[in-house]
Image (cartoon, grey):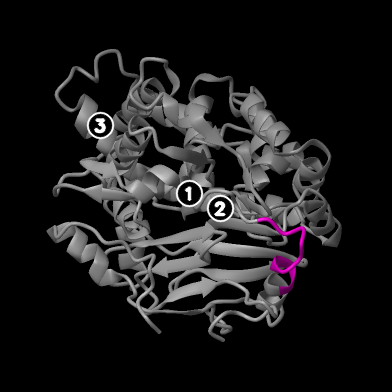
Amino acid sequence: MASPDFIPKVSDHRFHSAVLSRLPTEWEPWPDDQTSVNHDDALNTFIKRSRKKTFAWPKKPVVFVSDPHADAEAFEASLIAAGVIDRDGANLCEYQLTRFGRKAEIIVGGDCLDKGPSNLALLRSLAHLYRLKADVTLLAGNHDLRLLMGLLVLEREKDAGSQHLFVRMGRKVVPLFREVFDQYLVNTNWSRGMPSEAECRQALFPDEDWFENFPYFAAGFLTAEGIDREIGKMAVKSREFEAHCTDAGLSLQQVYAAAMKCRSLFLKDSGEFHWFFRKMRLVKQRGSFLFLHAGLDDHMAELLAKRGVKHANRAFKKNLMTQHLFSFYYGSLANTFRTKYRAVDLPLTERGSKAARQAGIQVLVHGHVNHHAGQRISLQQGLVHIEADITLDAHSREREGLDGLGVGVTLIDRKRGVVGLSGDYPRAKVFKPGRKGRLKGA
């Protein structure tokens, strides 16, 4: 196939060349194979519904980048791949919007934090998009909200529903604390007035009787499978969290100091990243597409059908700093950025799928489930999903055996249809129905 017109033309800079070398130079109609669809009927269902008169494409081109996971280089590489920015030099945050970038809507699909290698640089790069007055929407991801829950619980009275939420962040948050300690605390009197190592351990970890009390506290909120999964996960994390900190060269006192500094950076009006959680939204609807981090359950689908997206986002905002951390994090609102449609998750059934379509939602576009061969179209209870987490961050790529810089983006607009670009798939995947309901070029 000929070279697609959506591959960006950028300046001849060494970083740009590295990005372009990772991108496909040809396109193909969305492939109907197991790496690109999850079900025999997934692609056909998308084709049929996109041909209906009620189906609406976004009015502006949408650029969707999800799950950068603290890799600022991969994040900016993906924006270059989409043609929305042009970076002038080797340094991060030294970029400008292109002509297309000024016209497009950029949706960041959540999970900006955790894993590494550059949490703070990623946040600063995202802040630069806002400074450039880009049309950008930041969606809530489970890793982002786990940090917020962990920070909030530090200065609240312990209860069985929330006292585990700091350690629950696990090893993936440790690189953030290492960065914060090195950039803000290392040459200060950070230890003055600091609690002892034992006192820090008591503040950070759940009480000894948490494992006995949590199943009773969670009864009626979580399924039996969900409770067992949470207990099992916490047994491992409680046992290993301190070792991960030690491996990163951090004592528990230093972790506590870094966490308190994070509270200042993220939660205070004067903090460098005070905007991060305040700008966050739960969902974004454009035409027949709903953008979110993970997925829906019946309750959220019915809420969207009856009250709409604005109400869902207001409910999210009002619950974000709630005193009832347990009911928020394990409830239907948070399921939107946590679900993987497992038995332990709140269910999406045909009832919820019907409610979503009544709300004008035909397609969910999300991250959360990472893939190694580009984007995938899936079908969940008759609701079409575009799975757009294509494994960007360097640490995950190394651990999962993927070579090279993580780069990829999903483009959606009425002219080009759905375009999946990924450095891990040889061609651009293009979904755009022809006049007779067949994919063009098929």
Residue under the image location 24 percent in, 71 percent down: 21
Q: Which mark is residue 353?
A: none
Which residue, given by chain and number where applicable, does mark 2 sit on?
Answer: 233
Q: Which residue is mark 3?
A: 181
Quadrant for the C terminus in the image? bottom right
| Residue 370 location (% of width, % of height) | 48, 64
Q: How many marks?
A: 3
Left or right: 437 with respect to 266? right
Q: Describe residue 76's horizontal placement relative to residue 207 as left or right.
A: left
Residue 111 in view, yes or no: no
Q: Amino acid at mark 2?
A: Lys
Question: Local crowd at mark 1 within 10 Å, few (<14), some, or many (≥20)?
Answer: many
Coordinates of residue 263 in the picture (x, y in percent) = 41, 23
- The furthest residue to the front: 435
Residue 394 lies, in percent from the top left, at 30, 59
Q: Which residues are magenta?
A: 48-56
Q: Do callouts 2 and 1 mark residues in contact (Cβ within 8 Å)? A: yes
Q: Residue at the spot x=37%, y=81% of the render? A: 2
User: Circle 1 is placed at which residue position?
Assistant: 237
Q: Earlier in the sequence, mark 3 or mark 1?
A: 3
Label 2 neighbourhood size at 10 Å, few (<14), some (14-19), many (20+)?
Answer: few
Q: CA distance from mark 3 to mark 1?
A: 22 Å
> Foreground residue, 241 or 13?
13
Q: Secondary structure at mark 3?
A: helix
Considering only order in the chain, which callout, 3 or 2, is on the residue closer to the N terminus? 3
Separation of residues labelled 2 and 1 (CA atoms):
6 Å
Q: Compared to 404, does 66 lie above or below?
A: above
